[in-house]
Image (spheres, rainbow, N blue to C red):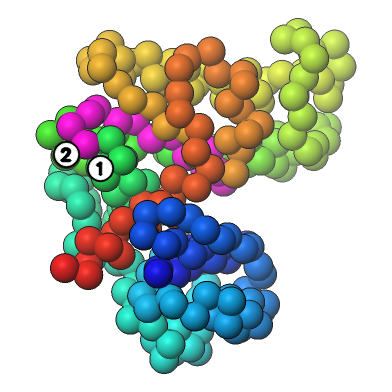
């Protein structure tokens, strides 16, 4: 069994895989990690290998804790991955995007794959049918758009995301909700169509924290999978066992 530790800026996700099946997932704060790890280790005593992917702070004490229990792999730009990386600046490619591309490579071999991760930022990652990662795009995420309107203006409030009832906002709040949601939807659908113009046989994956909020509003055929990044980390770990 494999343990995947995905360290974000706010939370840590821990996922247990039995072969290629995700059997358990838990989310905790950084300070809660030792206790959660102890409980999980007791519950799943057959875990032998562990992958750590960190975009947020993760102490050496936690690394030592994991390496004392398991065969540990830390994801970096030098880790072996199941695709060819054609990114012009591979050392700057985020570990989250590496994980997403790995999931695309393993789950959709010989297909053109566009992976859209709707989180703090919205990232677009394209993998060709020849298994070459080409790159993509990065734009502000939903929460960031609300925060930017509040921060950079004198009169606009800071709102929580909300799905507007109508396209035309008739108050400041509903206008902001409409601008954020339909702006994001138009961006996503427009980006998908641009890729489809060049790659007609395109598989599109939507993942990330805002997957559930967005998926019903997108009028283009997609696969929604909120665990796609965790699956990618598992595949990288398996790739590095050989």
Q: Which residue is mark 2?
A: 131
The picture places residue 192, in percent across and down from the top left corner, at 39, 20
SS label for mark 1: helix
- Residue drawn 22% across the image and 70% down it: 241
Badge 2: residue crowd in 10 Å (few <14, some 14–19, many ≥20)? many
In the image, residue 3 above or below residue 138: below
- Residue drawn 80% across the image and 14% down it: 165
The answer to whether residue 37 is seen in the rendering is no
Magenta segment = 109-122
- Residue drawn 65% across the image and 23% down it: 181
In the image, residue 236 above or below residue 223: below
In the image, residue 223 above or below residue 152: above
118 inside magenta stretch = yes
- In the image shown, does 20 or 54 lie closer to the viewer? 20
In the displayed structure, does residue 151 sit left or right of residue 106? right
- In the image shown, does 208 or 158 lie closer to the viewer? 208
- Residue drawn 16% across the image and 39% down it: 132
Q: Which residue is mark 1?
A: 105
């Amino acid at each position: 069994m494999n343990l995947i530790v995905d360290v974000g800026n706010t939370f840590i996700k821990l996922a247990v895989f039995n072969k290629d099946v995700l059997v358990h997932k838990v989310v905790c704060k950084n300070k809660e990690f030792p206790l959660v790890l102890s409980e999980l280790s007791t519950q799943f005593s057959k875990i032998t290998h562990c992958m750590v992917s960190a975009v947020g702070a993760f102490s050496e004490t936690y690394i030592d804790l994991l390496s004392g229990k398991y065969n540990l792999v830390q994801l970096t730009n030098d880790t072996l991955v199941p695709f060819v990386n054609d990114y012009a600046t591979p050392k700057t490619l985020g570990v989250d995007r590496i994980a997403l591309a790995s999931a695309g490579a393993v789950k959709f071999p010989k297909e053109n794959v566009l992976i859209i991760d709707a989180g703090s930022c919205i990232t677009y990652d394209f993998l060709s049918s020849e298994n070459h990662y080409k790159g993509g795009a990065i734009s502000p995420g939903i929460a960031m758009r609300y925060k930017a309107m509040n921060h950079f203006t004198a009169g606009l409030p800071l709102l929580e995301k909300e799905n507007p009832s109508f396209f035309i906002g008739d108050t400041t709040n509903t206008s902001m909700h409409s601008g954020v949601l339909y702006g994001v939807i138009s961006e996503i659908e427009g980006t998908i169509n641009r890729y489809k113009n060049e790659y007609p046989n395109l598989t599109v994956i939507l993942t990330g924290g805002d997957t559930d909020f967005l998926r019903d509003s997108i009028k283009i055929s997609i696969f929604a999978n909120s665990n796609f990044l965790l699956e990618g980390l598992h595949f990288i770990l398996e790739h590095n066992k050989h």
